[in-house]
RNA sequence: GCUCCCAUAGUAUAGCUUGGAUAGAAUGUGGGCUUCCGGAGCCUGAGACUCGGGUUCAAAUCCCGAUGGGAGCGCCA
């Protein structure tokens, strides 16, 4: 399961260590080894480190090492330059190593075992059930989805969760609005999607509230919808269920699938919050305040927490309320309870049933439900929340609670995948209330992308309408996913139609295109896969550059996993596609001069197809044979 | 007031954790490639590390200090 690059690197490290030993030098060589930009293939800076440590001349040390370095399986020659030890690889040997590994491991080549035996829960989307998903929420959906894919490819067992906030004030506003459609001037739902219809109501209620005082009425609705058996609670449940169905139609169009919906109302029904508070008070993390500003509330007092992280020092308040003086928990309290459950620190008393029998990926989507049956969810080693960076404070409070309770490991496994806000051009925030999302929903985005893809496919091939549409769907999605994921997640994303619908240059369709080209070359060669290449012979730099990239697939995947950064994969497939483009432009495969060159190149094309296909799938992009 | 995030070609970005040689793609722009496995492509030119100190043989990267932009610090969710 070791990548070819790791194998070559380890061998070089071993040989270097042996050479150092002969000269009585010591140095941790592995970190000094890296690809070289222009001096040979691989370089080591160990001589520079040793020279510094022992106050010697780096040039002398490097020369001494180079002179003693044995060749092993993969080294062709060694030179030195200003204290750098530069190694030229034996290209044919390295290429053979790569090709044999890829062809042997096939689909498991783009995999890793670093997470084997560990359980991770990822939470993403978690949108209020009040308006359709917009391009800002798409960032959570795609980030969460791809990080989950990456974890899965690295051997973790991953549970994908969507938190349904059905008891919030926003939901109440829509419930109120639904009962006052005439006042708002809204007709019954006709042909539009249900989430869009609710969104219209939500915006109208907020507009109406500017000139009318409906505060009291909304509060009444909140109260009523939390009481079982009321009209409001029944209406709410039906409304949210319908909303979720509409929301998932959208999620599926983004290629996003999940495993379980956790309803806030079920968290309340299962008294998770009460159990969490018991635990917090028992361990003296939370306490009830008798007097002062927070009289009657249960709070976390930051003064009581040992090793308080800096973000909690010098706040305006030195306490954080968990339970209001009227006895009701706030958002943070519920989130702490939810995460204690995720980590298996509270009993899994939820019952579950199928919400969607089969998502497009073939798997069911479950939901918490009082009339369901117990199932094995939760109990994670790692939790990952793809949530907006603006919620960093609340997220760090959850982590703080875990730490204060003494669950150090769990606190370490708590990860907030904070992403920067998505804005519209002109610094316009995507505000649910104000309806700035109108025209910027995921449904709009997907529709536009598909139309553009359809136009581009045109009449290029003899395709049935059905095939054409399927390809347009896949290409459109590739463009969208690529553009949302290529930006480092902590940065603010300014949404632009031009960028979101980019099909050229560094783009999803570009990567798909290179995959398609490779497929056609193999197809023309008579078989779609090359099973074995006895001896690889490479004549050029472009070929070896491609080999070097292909060697690193697993290392790249692992890096993307440990850093939870999908843009690392996007960068990689972009470079890989470009390198492959150069390769096939410069080196004829089918019309290669010799049979051996032809076979070697075919093997390389096959390896590329395997790696690119695997990487695209992890990114949630469909590799397509022709486009 | 305090905390966090961001700053790299015209635009939009990768690299920063772990310092290393010529800062890498894209887009736009100048020039070129279409009898050749698919031009959603390829080749080629010009173009960037916010500023000031410091550490180092070596700084986009580490440290200190400015500056500019964003977010957060609620008995809201």
Image (spheres, coloured by chain):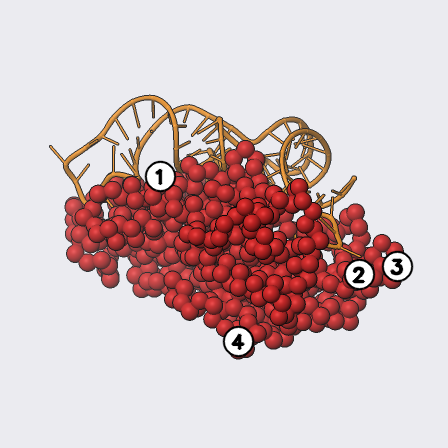
CB of mark 4 within 8 Å of CB of mark 2? no
In the rendered structure, the residue with mark 1 lies on which chain?
A
Task: State how far apart marks 4 and 2 are (Cα).
Answer: 34 Å
Instruction: Locate the N terminus of chain A and report the quarter of the image it occupies.
Output: bottom left
4 and 2 marks on the same chain? yes
In the rendered structure, the residue with mark 4 lies on which chain?
A
Q: Which mark is residue A291?
A: 3
Residue A230, x across and y down, in percent = 62, 67
3 and 2 marks on the same chain? yes
In the rendered structure, the colour chosen for chain A is red
Residue A384, x across and y down, in percent = 56, 59
* Residue identifier under label 4: A372
Q: How many marks?
A: 4
**In the structure shown, which secondary structural element does the residue marked by tag 4 occupy?**
loop
* Residue identifier under label 1: A504
**In the structure shown, which secondary structural element does the residue marked by tag 3 occupy?**
loop
Residue A437 visible within the image: yes
Residue at horizontal 73 percent and vertical 63 percent from the top: A328
- Closer to us: A190 or B55: A190
- Closer to us: A331 or A149: A331
């Amino acid at each position: 399961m070791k990548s070819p690059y790791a194998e070559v690197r380890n061998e070089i490290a071993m040989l270097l260590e042996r050479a150092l030993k002969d000269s009585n030098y010591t140095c941790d060589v592995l970190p000094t080894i890296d690809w070289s930009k222009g001096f040979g293939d691989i370089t080591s800076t160990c001589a520079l480190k040793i020279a510094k440590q022992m106050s010697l001349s780096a040039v002398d040390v490097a020369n001494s090492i180079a002179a003693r370095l044995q060749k092993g399986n993969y080294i062709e020659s060694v030179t030195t330059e200003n204290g750098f030890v530069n190694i030229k690889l034996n290209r044919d040997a390295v290429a053979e190593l790569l090709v044999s590994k890829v062809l042997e491991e096939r689909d498991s080549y783009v995999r890793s075992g670093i997470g084997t035996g560990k359980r991770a829960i990822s939470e993403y989307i978690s949108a209020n059930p009040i308006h359709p998903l917009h391009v800002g929420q798409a960032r959570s959906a795609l980030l969460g989805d791809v990080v989950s894919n990456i974890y899965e490819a690295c051997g973790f067992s991953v549970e994908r969760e969507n938190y349904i906030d059905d008891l919030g004030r926003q939901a109440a506003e829509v419930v109120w609005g639904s009962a006052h459609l005439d006042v708002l001037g809204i007709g019954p739902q006709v042909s539009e999607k249900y989430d869009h219809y609710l969104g219209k109501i939500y915006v109208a209620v907020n507009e109406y509230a500017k000139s009318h005082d409906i505060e009291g009425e909304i509060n009444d609705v909140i109260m009523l919808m939390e009481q079982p058996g009321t009209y409001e609670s029944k209406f709410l449940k039906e409304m949210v269920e319908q909303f979720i169905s509409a929301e998932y139609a959208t999620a599926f169009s983004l290629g996003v699938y999940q495993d379980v919906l956790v309803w806030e109302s079920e968290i309340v029904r299962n008294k998770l919050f009460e159990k969490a508070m018991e635990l917090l008070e028992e361990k003296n993390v939370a306490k009830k305040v008798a007097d002062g500003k927070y009289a009657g509330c249960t709070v976390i007092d930051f003064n009581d927490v040992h090793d308080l992280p800096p973000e909690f020092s010098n706040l305006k308040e030195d306490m954080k309320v968990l339970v209001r003086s009227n006895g009701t928990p706030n958002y943070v309290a519920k989130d702490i309870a939810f995460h204690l459950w995720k980590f298996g620190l509270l009993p899994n008393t939820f019952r579950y049933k199928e919400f969607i029998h089969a998502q497009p990926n073939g798997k069911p989507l479950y939901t918490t439900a009082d009339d369901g049956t117990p199932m094995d969810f939760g109990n994670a080693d790692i939790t990952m929340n793809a949530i907006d960076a603006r919620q960093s404070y609340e997220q760090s409070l959850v982590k703080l609670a875990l730490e204060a309770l003494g669950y150090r490991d769990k606190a370490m496994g708590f990860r907030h995948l904070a992403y920067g806000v998505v804005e519209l051009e002109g610094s316009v925030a995507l505000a649910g209330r104000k309806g700035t999302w109108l025209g910027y929903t995921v449904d709009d985005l997907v529709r536009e992308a598909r139309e553009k893809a359809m136009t581009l496919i045109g009449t290029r091939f003899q395709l049935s309408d059905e095939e054409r549409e399927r390809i347009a769907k896949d290409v459109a999605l590739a463009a969208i996913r690529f553009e949302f994921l290529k930006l480092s997640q902590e940065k603010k994303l300014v949404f632009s139609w031009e960028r979101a619908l980019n099909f050229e240059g560094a783009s999803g369709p570009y990567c798909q295109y290179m995959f398609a080209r490779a497929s056609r070359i193999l197809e023309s060669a008579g078989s779609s896969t090359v099973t074995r290449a006895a001896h690889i012979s490479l004549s050029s730099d472009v070929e070896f550059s491609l080999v070097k990239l292909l060697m690193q697939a697993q290392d790249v995947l692992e890096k993307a996993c440990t850093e939870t950064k999908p843009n690392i994969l996007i960068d990689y497939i972009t470079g890989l596609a470009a390198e492959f483009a150069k390769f096939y432009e410069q080196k004829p495969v089918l019309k290669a001069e010799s049979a051996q060159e032809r076979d070697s190149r075919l093997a390389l094309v096959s390896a590329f197809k395997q790696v690119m296909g695997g990487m695209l799938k992890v990114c949630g992009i469909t590799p397509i044979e022709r486009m």
